[in-house]
Amino acid sequence: MSLQAAAFLALGMILLLFVIAALVESRGAAFARHPVLRHRAYTLALGVYCTSWTFYGAVGSAVRDGWSYLPIYAAPILLLLAAPRFLRRLAAAVAEEQATTVSDFIAARFGHDVVVARLVTIIALLGTIPYIALQLRSIGAALSIVSGADVAAQAMLTAAPLLALFAILFGARRFELAGRSEGLLYAISLESAVKLVALIAVAGVAVFVLLRSPAADVAVGMAALQDRFRPERLTLDVAMIFLIATAAIIVLPRQFYMGLVEAREPGDLDRARRGLALYLGTMAVVVIPIALAGLTILGPSVAPDVYVLELPASEGFGLVLAAALLGGVSAAASMAIVDSTALATMVSNDLVFPTLMRGRAPSGSSGSGAIGRRMLTVRRLSILGIMALGLAWAMMVSAQDSLASIGLIAFAAMAQFTPHLLLAAAGKNRDALAARASLAVGLALWLYTLALPPVLPTAWLDLLSAGPFDPLQLFGIGNASPLSHGVIWSVGANLAVYAAVAARKVQAPPLPRFVRAERPIANLSELAQLTASFIGREQAARAFPDADAATAIDSQSARRARELIAQVVGASSARALVASAIAGDKLSLPEVTRLLDEGGQSLRFSRGLLASTFENIDAGISVVDAQMNLVAWNSRYLDLFGYPAGMVRVGVPVADLIRHNARRGDFGDGDVDYHVEKRLDHMRRGQEHSFERHRRDGKVIKTVGGPMPGGGYVMSFTDISEEARIREELRRTLDELEQRVADRTRELSDANRRLAHADRDKTRFLAAASHDLLQPLHAARLFTAALGRDAADGQRDLVHRVESAIVAAEDLLRSL
């Protein structure tokens, strides 16, 4: 392959990472609507563990040392598959402490001790810079091998600034450490996929070559490889590598950053562990056919570390050679980018920030967000400095040093604070003084026995070997290899010192005074101004809406300020800063420390109580913050709405959830964006609401919502389907009853009308009948009157009685 083609491929791979990261950052809302895609990208991004060491150097390690290559993969796989409870506990602890770096987390669990944070940072820095140099050198070596030209130096000088620029643009975009770098995550996931596919392709070439090679040659290669894997070659070195590699999957700065900081929820790492174990297992398996083919075809003249490149090149597989080059470049680039990003945060927070703030007045003299912007600048300069140191080391280190040896020394460095990470995951309030002493001793012995011997002049090593302080055999004890010797001494002394100091139960000194101002912060208004200098006035105003000079600082306000400042400088530095800023005439430094601790304990109790309350409420609860991002919910909320797995998580924009419901038809017909904006506007204005929503699945959900102090919105969702059904039945019953009453009324009215008609007929009949009957009676009265005039005196009484009877009959007829 020509130099131009090789350079174009390498540069194209790095530029592709730029394009992917920029695309994701510019279209973040679109990617946020696909939680499954994000989780897959997160799982792949954890493959940043596999650097150029594992891409190129694992084959070399398998050929040279046999079993020594296996623990690099097997140990993390064992941890991932056998310790899910530990991983969940670690993730929950990191989320609780809101830690953004491994040093921040360990220090937070050791009493927020800034000295512990500094020691962890120094160890990580010293162990990782040679590792970054290893990545830069592998890029240069790969281009030189592929092109046949000695361009290693030029390649490193080109790659280092490009990788630093990428880390600055996408790893240090904002001064809030809590802001996740989605573009960085997706770019790293792409490189993980590229290097896996590339190594599988090289393994495919190896299998093809072995199948067409003479059986005798394959037998020779197989015998040589089997010799490396004889049981008697399972030495102490293999055990030491297994020991230091077990926790590397979580303790390396890049792994902690990608696995725990970039996780959206504490359960993300647990859900990704099987996928990551499969990834590592695949990388481990494909090493064997490549190693066997290299021994069979390439012979002893070719260094095993370059089998991955030389094998497809020697057999004329140009596309596979290009893939191998891209895989190696992407593996090296991703490690350098993520590690420099994580280390820059540690350096700026734990080493630079205390110096930057020492002696500064903590009042509102700084502009809005001024310190936050200054910290962002420091972080970016730290990235440049780390990459420059890595480049300088790469230019000085011998190209003959194996990739595996440099990587193992870096792993041994991280092993110095692995016990402290395990203790931190198990609980809080650990012994800070014991941690300081043990980390310092472990660092010193690691430097002396592992880091310095490869770079010391031979004359110096010969001089030291003549006395008891031989770095390769301290005090003349034992006869172990340099790696085992250094790990046993450094980690062993580390643990022994911790146990000895912790057993004495000596209290650590109080927090250092970051700030020694003329007048300490005395009221809530000044505390808000201090917070604003880190995060900006707008966010500080939302956090402290009622801040004034007459309001005293309480534990809740101090804790809130510490949490907000921790978004910029980390939890431990923020705690020390707030404590030293508040301490003064009214409160001593220990009293402020207790104030912060009590506030944190109260908060944890309140959170636990609130979580228990949420889970025992029949209604679904959701809470969004002032930025309209989901921050809390209960399981009933998930049951009611049935969101896809992974969609509901801390920090997800509530607009995504509303849009999902709108597309499902929960809000009826109409434009989806209209429904989303309508509800977002309602929440932003802080308007209370209460309504019932009839969903297409037949459920009736009653929604009640209202604003929260300081911004945000809380809503409750109650399934009132049964109540709505009963109400509907009552309504139907009332409607039926009203209809029956109306029917009965109508029937009665008809009967009354018929009765009235009959009564009128009767009246007319009686009137006619009485008239006809009265006529004869009138005539009879006339006759009786005439008879009475002519009747004798004795008969007149009888006639009078007859007339009275006739009159009575007339009266009777008239009454009818």
Image: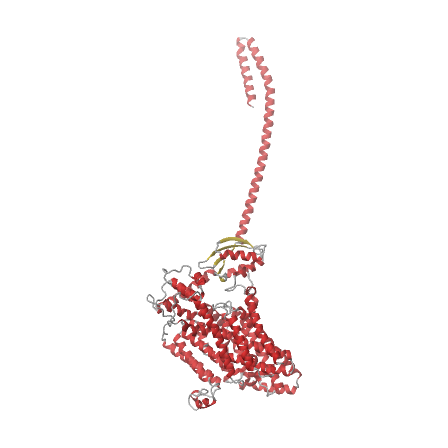
Q: Position of residue 32 (x, y in %)?
A: 55, 65
Asked whether the viewer can see residue 252, the reply is no
* Residue 174 placement, left or right of 580: right
Q: Position of residue 488 (x, y in %)?
A: 45, 83
What colour scheme was applied to this rendering of the protein?
A: secondary structure
Between residues 679 and 285, which one lies in front from this camera angle?
679
Residue 499, located in which quarter of the rendered image? Answer: bottom left
Number of numbered discs overlaid on the protein picture: 0
* Residue 435 placement, left or right of 618: left
* Residue 665 placement, left or right of 584: right
Quadrant showing the N terminus: bottom right
Q: Position of residue 86 (x, y in %)?
A: 48, 72
Q: Position of residue 800 (x, y in %)?
A: 53, 13
Residue 510, located in which quarter of the rendered image? Answer: bottom left
What residue is drawn where x is 48% and y is 58%?
Answer: 714
Residue 693, located in which quarter of the rendered image? Answer: bottom right
Instruction: Give the farthest residue toward the left.
Output: 585
Quadrant showing the C terminus: top right
Between residues 32 and 36, which one lies in front from this camera angle?
32
Asked whether the viewer can see residue 181, the reply is yes
